Amino acid sequence: MGLKGKVLLVHRDDGVFDELRQTLQSLGLEAFRVSSCKEVQSRLNGVGDFLTVFTEGRLPDGEYRDVCRIASRPVMPLPVIVVSLYLDSMENGASDFIVPPFLCTDIAHVVMTAISDGLPRRLAVSQHAAARA
């Protein structure tokens, strides 16, 4: 498929995410894993080199809403995709939600949509930050 870039996977040990990681890698994306909101905060501090974040619904120290809040940071906000059937996730800050099985074409579409939908906001934020510097 030819996608390039990094995605952040936020989950505890879970076979579902192993399948997702393999699908993302087959699309050409590098997948990095953390398992808590605290680790998301730490990983997303600084340079915004991730394209998107995939998270499970519940984490040891929070839930997907917390990941959405962290990823909406002022410097380079990132789209969050919830890997669960949370129908209200998009009303609570997520870009999308997905459920297994993960087909390459579906995942590619979800990633591309999340990136393109979030691009105007990311550009506006980065231009605003550059103007303030």
Image: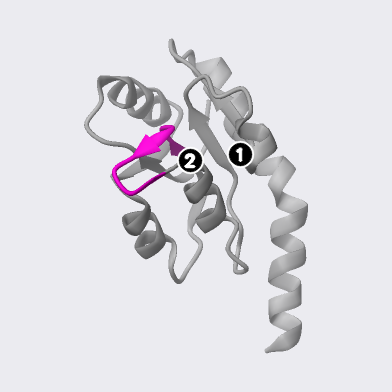
In the displayed structure image, the side of residue 21 where residue 49 appears, left or right = right
Label 2–label 1 contact, CB within 8 A: yes
Coordinates of residue 36 in the picture (x, y in percent): 31, 49
Q: Is residue 109 left or right of residue 10?
A: right
Q: Residue at x 60, y 45 (%)?
A: 79
Q: Mark 1 highlights which residue?
A: 94
Spot occupied by residue 101 in the image (x, y as percentages of width and height): 43, 10
Q: Quadrant of the C terminus?
A: bottom right
Q: Is residue 59 above or below residue 83?
A: below
Residue 57: in magenta span = yes
Q: Which residue is more in the foreground, 33 or 55?
A: 55
Depth check, front residue: 90 or 19: 90
Identity of the residue drawn at 63% across and 28% down: 88
- Label 2, secondary structure: give it: helix
Q: CA distance from mark 2 to mark 1?
A: 8 Å
Mark 2 or mark 1: name the one nearer the start of the chain: 2
Residue neighbourhood size for the residue with mark 2, other residues' Cα within 10 Å, grouped as few (<14), some (14–19), many (≥20): many
Which residue lies at the image location 53% right of the left edge and 25% below the top edge? 1
Farthest residue, direction bottom: 133
* Residue density around tag 1, few if under 14, some if 14–19, many if 20 or more, within 10 Å: many
What is the x, y in percent for residue 126?
A: 69, 70
Residue type pointed to by label 1:
Ala
Q: Quadrant of residue 32?
A: top left
Residue 28 screen position, x and y as percent: 43, 34
Which residues, given as a range, are shown in magenta?
A: 54-62
Give the structural element (helix, strand or loop) at label 1.
loop
For label 2, the residue is: 64
